[in-house]
Image: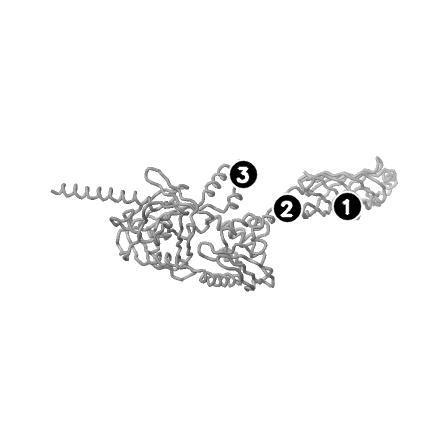
Amino acid sequence: MARRGIVFVILIMVCGSISAQTGASALRDYVGLINQAYHPDIVAYFEKIKAELDKKGEPDAVKAIDLFLKGSTGSGFVINAGGAFYILTNYHVIAQAYRLSITFERQDGYKRVFENLKIIAADEETDLALLAFATGDRPVSGALQFLSRPLEEGEDVYSAGFPSLGAMPLWQFGRGMVSNAAARFPKSLLDETLMGPFVQHTAQVDPGNSGGPLLVPQRNVPGGYLVAGVNTLSALWRQAANYAIPVDTTRQFINSAFDAKSDAWRAALDKRLGEFTEGLGANKAVYPHIADFLSSACVGENAEYAISELFEKGNRTTQQSFIEKCEDSVVGAMGYAVAWTIENSIRNQGSIKAEIKEVTGSGEEYTVLFTMNNKDFSSTWIREFGNWRLRTFGEVAAGNKELLTKKEEERKNEKAIRVDGSFNIEAGYAFLFEKGNAMYISANFVQSVGARIYFASPDFWTLGVFGQFRKTIKKGALGIMPYVNLGLEFQHDKAWDDAKKTIDTFGQLDLPWAVAIQGGIKITTSKVPGLYGGAGFQYNPFTLSENPDPMKMAVLVMAGYSF
């Protein structure tokens, strides 16, 4: 009898397993994989980087960029609102998108992809977003329905979505229970503002599950389950502590999305502008604050120029902040760079004093004129993801490709300007005040050490060694290098040699060496890389001999080539 009971229990478990599997399979028609496509300018920027890495023979880096360009992913599910089908997901799943798509995949591998999803509404605070299919798209005949009662602690719940395995999102259906039906917790260790309530549960939630539904079984409904929440995050340092946005919060968000009116948009803009302006006055770097207000188009169109500016002119702290942000979000780091260029254009010294001077426009686009540190800055604000965001700001974040073209031209010029190479050789004409005309030859090694020759005639020549101090100034296509040499010069003078016997009879020191100081300027252009011309003046303040210096001063002109 006991064995029959065990067999009966096993049959029930198997049947239950088959039933659950069937329900989970049906869910695939309603729960999809959401994919973000980045702004075309971001894609083009990384394609250029990829091409450079490919030339350098770095296949791993190329593959990493390819994976990035596939876009980040999350989960979402189909709902019915007002008789039309929409997709509900998390705000953070779509926050950096320029275009969105959703893919539904069945067990047999058959996929249906719906492109160009439109964002109807999004809310950063509740972390919810509502998307619409393109005109005429209907993924299935029905949609998931919401649970109409509160969840109970200890109740079985299920998660569904597309968490990633490595770089590949895979369907996952998980089971757990409600461990806290109304969890509330502070935003961070530094911010005690409470978030929630959330449904805390133990069903599997991994990166990529965000935006997927939390479910409870229900017969005779599409998919065999009711939506009890929207999975949004997991707790660190906790075992199986996952959190879903409850149904009540979700319903309020959906209702407000369809109740939004244009007159309320203007009030929301005024509030948003106030928050933006107030944050600029903080006594610290404010580019993270500015980044929160940038639209996806503003980031995409200005990122390449901004990153170049940041690593050319930004301090080490700012550059490190960019790198650290990349570990969390590459597109978010790009937003940091664009925001930094905006802050850099505003700030002179000290804090930023900002006020709104004029607001004009209508509908979903306004022009806002700010006065910041006694200077006017024009900006464009648009409604994106259900919130007001910066589309353009001043000249540095206006999507002006001429800025990038100019910077690329400057970079090419700087690379082509070569007057301070590791090896320079030059020759020219010198006028020696005491000896007349001479030929001048000089060579620099390892940038700062060199040798030179003055040759006036077989009766007079010099050979010197020197150390060089120099600074290269690059301006557009022109390169200028002021320099100073300090060295010793061996001087051969026949007239001096003829007097040597007389000098030696008196026992005087006779070392034909002179201390030499030479200064001048060298000029080159990017039009002929490496070739330069210059002029200099040499003065020998004293010799190591009792004899007078036969070459006290000289002026020279030269031409040279820098390798």
Coloring scheme used: one colour
Pick the residue in front: 441 or 307.
Answer: 307
Residue 274 at least partly seen: yes
Distance, label 2 to label 3, CA atoms, is: 21 Å
Q: Please name the amino acid that badge 2 sits on.
A: Glu
Residue 342 falls left or right of residue 72: right
Pick the residue in front: 489 or 308.
Answer: 308
- Neighbourhood count class around disc 2 (C-alpha, 10 Å): few under 14, some 14–19, many 20 upward: some
Q: How many marks?
A: 3
Distance, label 3 to label 1, CA atoms, is: 45 Å
Residue, disc 3: 51
Residue, disc 2: 410
Q: Residue at x 40, y 51 (%)?
A: 131
User: Mark 2 vs mark 1: which is more N-terminal?
Assistant: 2
Residue, disc 1: 536
Residue 338 at x, y percent in the picture: 54, 52
